[in-house]
Image (tube, helix red, strand yellow):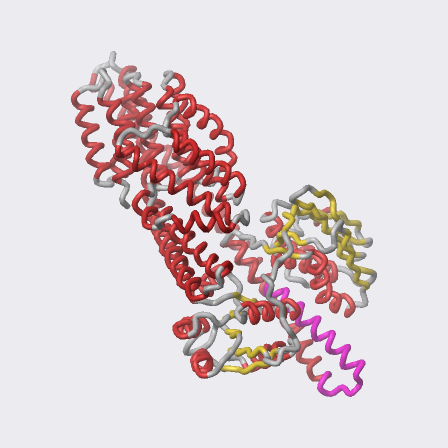
Amino acid sequence: MNLLKSFLILIAFYCLPFFGHSQINENHTYHNKRLNQLISKDSIYEATLLLNEDIAYAKANNQPLALAYILQTLGSMFSQIESPDTAANYYSKAAHLFDSLNKPQEIDDVLTHLSRNYVDGKNYKKFDSIIPIALQQSINLNSINLFYNLESKVRKNYFLRNYEIALKSSDEALKKLENYDFVSEKDQAEKERLIISFQYYKGVAMINLKHFEEGYKILFELDPHQFRITGKEKIAPISQMSTLNYYKFRYFSERTKQLDSANKYLLKADSLKYIAIRDFQNRLSENGDLIFKIITTEKQLQLANTKRQEDKALSNTFLMATIVLSLLLVGLATFFYYYYTNRRHIKKINLRLKESNKKLKIIDKERLEFFSILSHELRTPIYGINGLATLIEQEESPDKRKGYLNALISSSNYISVLIDNVLQISKLKFENKKLHFKPTNVLQLVKRISRSIKVSANQKGLEFYTNVEKTNWNEFLLIDKVVLSQILINLTYNAIRYTSKGFISINVTEQQRTDTHVNLLFEIKDSGIGIQTKHRDIIFNAFENKTFLEKNSSGSGLGLHIVKTLLKSHNSEIQFVSKPNEGSTFYFDIDFEIAEAPSDNGHFFNPVSDTPTKILVVDDNTINLMVTQKNVEKIPGCISETAAHGKEAVCLVKEKYFDLVLMDINMPDMDGFEATKHIRLFNPTIPILALTALNSAEIQDKATACGMNYVITKPYDFEEFKSIILKFSNVFQD
């Protein structure tokens, strides 16, 4: 971790004013020389210890100005090792001290650092509250900090994609730079860095605002190597170089249609992006350990200072007694204090261990009961599937065969939902749920969900209704359709499970609308058994609602817990009203951002084309291979060929022409990731789509890293599968 350049600036902030203070003795001057040596050698941990000692010294000797410089230095140190919250705390304390001492230049400096720290820490709410004050201070002093504050403002709006504000602020900064007086060579170099930075953000903003000609002109005039030379932070220049190459890729891909040049810049952008991510992760790991060590040590120092003060007070109290008697009394008091304290502590630990052991036994019992229920829930539909398959084979009546098929689909859908819930419960326990928003039509999403659920409702003789009331039926919203589908499916299957006659309905109602957002109310109603008051507090708790389940159903008890947890990621809560023996209504509302309809960039599928789309299907499972091949051949204009493992797929792509590859991931000998890497060595353009039952962020990242274009998760909706195939089989054929 090379922080030398940044900390030389900190020395100027802290050490020089501190050395000039009249109250500092020779011992403390040596102390500051030692601090200078530690910072220059990147010994941040030892430097922090000395700074904490300086804080104690400044407080003890009533030196508020020196204390303010020390706090500002600590803020800069924590900002450099990427601990923005701790840095902000020190900057704020320093700002209050400088303000009380009427130090305008120092206030200007620390507010500038604080503003940039809030942007780096993505704390935009606090940034918006401090940036007007920081800008006004730098304008009043006519200081160079004006441009650093404008740069922070541009970066914040760039990160939030507020490109109009980013463009306006960049133009303002560039105009002011023309008239600002930079005196020294160092200032001139900083001026060049600022011009390059604002030009970069201006170009990116103009492209995203569709001012393509001027935006690309600005970016192509920038020298990417100057980012590395003039950038203050280690990671930002690499990220900027990656983004610059990405926009060059877009220029050659979208504007001039020069695919060779476009691919060259795309590879450069991806390579730099992976370097930036790797460096960022390494730095996070190193800084995390360092921050933990520093904070732990600071607490220990605070405790040590408190202990010293207590000892000093105790010594003053017993000065009038003899030394021997004082030592004896202190020794006896200390002995008995620690003796009884340790005894109480041991008793508390033993009590906690007993309580913990008791809870573990209860949890273990609940888990055993849960897996017993789960075993029953899996065996029941599997037995039904086996029996229905035999009946379909033996039955000659088309109507009865169709009925058996619907029952088979219902059992299959139930197993799929059950397995998804079991897998989801472990994900929600060990990782935060990240949402992946895509433009989605709510009406079409509800229709797709209803098609799969209606079969199960009809099997129980229940009426199934859907009702979507919206102002705009064709409107697209930013929705994580996987998460929303799982919420609605779990609630609807729950309603089916507890309803023996009557109806189930899904209702979607538009409650409120602004220019950018729509609030939708989702209601799942049933005419089932209802929920008694005594069960209201436990039905959402996984593994704890077995009392309710034992009396009313044999379900797994995971669905409502998963729904409640997933809705937290939408800042929403599940609520319900219910009357025993009359039915229940579960409802929730979500604010969705309005999105533009997805564009296919002018690529349309021509089903009457003379040349069919040839697709290679790769899967080591014979049944899955057959199902995928049949689905592909149901798409008009598509034909397919199959491969049973990764090595065979590589050979076929090398020998024959294919428009698209559907690649399984888990295969023996050579998995889908390795097969894709081999294909990319000689064919970098063919679309390769992963077709897998695995579903996690790690799989998505590995697929992108090896060169795959998209991940389709099994099981999938055929219409969605069809649209993805048509999209990728046409995008690369212009």
Residue furthest top in the image = 320
Magenta span: 392-420
Q: 365 or 98, which is in the foreground? A: 98
Q: In this image, 409 relative to 614: left or right?
A: right
Quadrant in which the C terminus is drawn:
bottom right
Q: Residue at x 43, y 70 (%)?
A: 684
| 416 in the magenta segment | yes
Q: Position of residue 187 (x, y in %)?
A: 30, 33
Q: Position of residue 48 (x, y in %)?
A: 28, 34
Q: Is residue 457 above or below residue 65?
A: below
Q: In this image, 48 relative to 132: left or right?
A: left
Q: In this image, 3 relative to 702: left or right?
A: left
Q: Position of residue 542 (x, y in %)?
A: 60, 54
Identify the main secondary structure in magenta: helix
Regarding residue 88, the answer to whether it shows in the image is no
In which image quadrant can residue 420 be found?
bottom right
Q: 477 or 377, which is in the foreground? A: 477
Q: 207 or 463, which is in the foreground? A: 207
Q: Residue at x 74, y 47 (%)?
A: 510
Regarding residue 412, the answer to whether it shows in the image is yes
Q: Position of residue 117 (x, y in %)?
A: 41, 36
Q: 8 or 155, which is in the foreground? A: 155
| 190 in the magenta segment | no
Q: Residue at x 77, y 58 (%)?
A: 466
Q: Is residue 399 above or below residue 246?
A: below
